[in-house]
Every structure is written in C-alpha cells, then in structure tokens.
Amino acid sequence: MRLPTLITLFLLATIAQAAPKGDDGSAPRAALLMYDKLVGPNEADKALPLYYATTTRERALAAVLANCDGALANLRKKAADKYTPEIADAMLHSLDATTAEDINAAKIEVMGDKALVTFPNSTRPTIMTKVKSEWKISVKAIAQDVQDNPRNFRKSFTRLATLVNQTADKISQGQYADPEEASKKLIEGYKALFASADQK
C-alpha cells in the first residue's frame, strides 16, 4: 500500500512564484519539492496547504494526511541525525512514503488543470489539481479510492503517524541497537497496523 501522501513541504514563497511555467510537469514537480522542503517535524499545519479539499469529509482526510506528513518528516530528521540521510530515506520507503528523490524521478503528465504523478514503484498515480495557479494534491481523488471505508482509512493513518513518531523518538533516544533494528520494528508495526485495518 502506498501512502497517498508524499512527505512534503519547502520555502515560504507561493507555488505560483516558485514553480516553472509550462505543461511539461515541471510546475507540479516544483510544488511537490517545495512542500517536501517546507514541512518540518510534526508541522502538519505546513503540510495541509498541499491538499485541495472542498467538503467536510475531504478536509477531515486532508488533516489526517497532513498529520502523517509531519510525522514522516519527524522520522526522517531524527533518523538522518542519528544515522544517515540515506538510511532515513530507506526507512520512509519501507513505509511506502515518498522522498525528494522519488519526486524528482516521478513521471508527470499534465492535462490542463490536472496532473497525474506516478512515483517510482507506484501502481497508481497521485492526482494533482491546479487551484488559483497553485498545484495541490486532490483529496477528492484520494477519497474516491477509499470510499468503502473512509473512517477506517483515517484511523489507520492516524495510528501510523503515532507509530512513526514513537519510532522517531526511540531512534533519537538511542533505544535501538542499530538502524536495522529500528527499521525492523517500524516495518513490523506498519504491517500489523494495516493488516488489522484490512480485517475490519
């Protein structure tokens, strides 16, 4: 399962100012890279503007995704500080989360105000939409994918954020013997979380 999210956020300039113009995918890519840089550890408030939501249900989902983005940024920082940036990125990949390298390698197809972003090893594209000259992730598209049980989806990602933050704290406190042990515990928790969610 791939996180619909992308760990996100960069610079305080608007996407309209920072993103190159054109229909070659450079503008959506620049938006994603901007957010990848901007969001710091547990800064869900900075991640939230990446998501385009128009209904109460979509806004609730966007808040959960932004919270998860902040937790993933926290894990990356603490794992990079304790180990290396490469190990931190590998941990994110073990959760099917997206890194800046993935954003740069993504295939992006722009069709007017819509863009399909396909990340490496992803079977389904992330849909972005252009809103007042800014490219954002369409929460409506994500909600349509999880319409069978949106509440369980939100619960699972809320629990994932908790798991990620707990792992990040243990890494920074030196509670793991090495990065392999930290990764193993993280993957075990991730699999157990979504296995139990799938059974509901």
Image: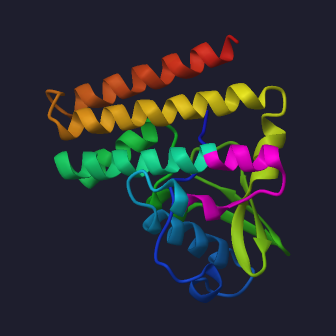
| Residue in the foreground of this view, choosing between 73 and 117 | 73
- The residue sitting at 74% across, 50% down in the picture is 59
Q: Quadrant of the N terminus?
A: top right
Q: Nearer the viewer, residue 161 or 112?
A: 161
Answer left or right for 91 relative to 175: right
What x and y, as percent, mark residue 30?
Answer: 57, 75
Q: How is the image coloured?
A: rainbow
For the residue pair 3 and 147, the one nearer the viewer reads as 147
**Residue 22 at x, y = what percent?**
72, 86
Say which residue appears at 32% left-offset and 24% top-offset.
184
Residue at 41% from the left image edge and 52% from the top image edge? 73
Quarter assignment of residue 129: bottom right
Q: Is residue 88 above or below residue 115?
A: above
Asked whether 58 falls inside the magenta stretch, the response is yes
Question: Residue 193 placed where, x, y %?
Answer: 53, 20
Is residue 109 positioned above or below 148 on the image?
below
Main SS of residues in magenta: helix
Q: Quick check: 113 above or below 59?
A: below
Span of residues in magenta = 47-63
Quadrant location of the C terminus in the rendered image: top right
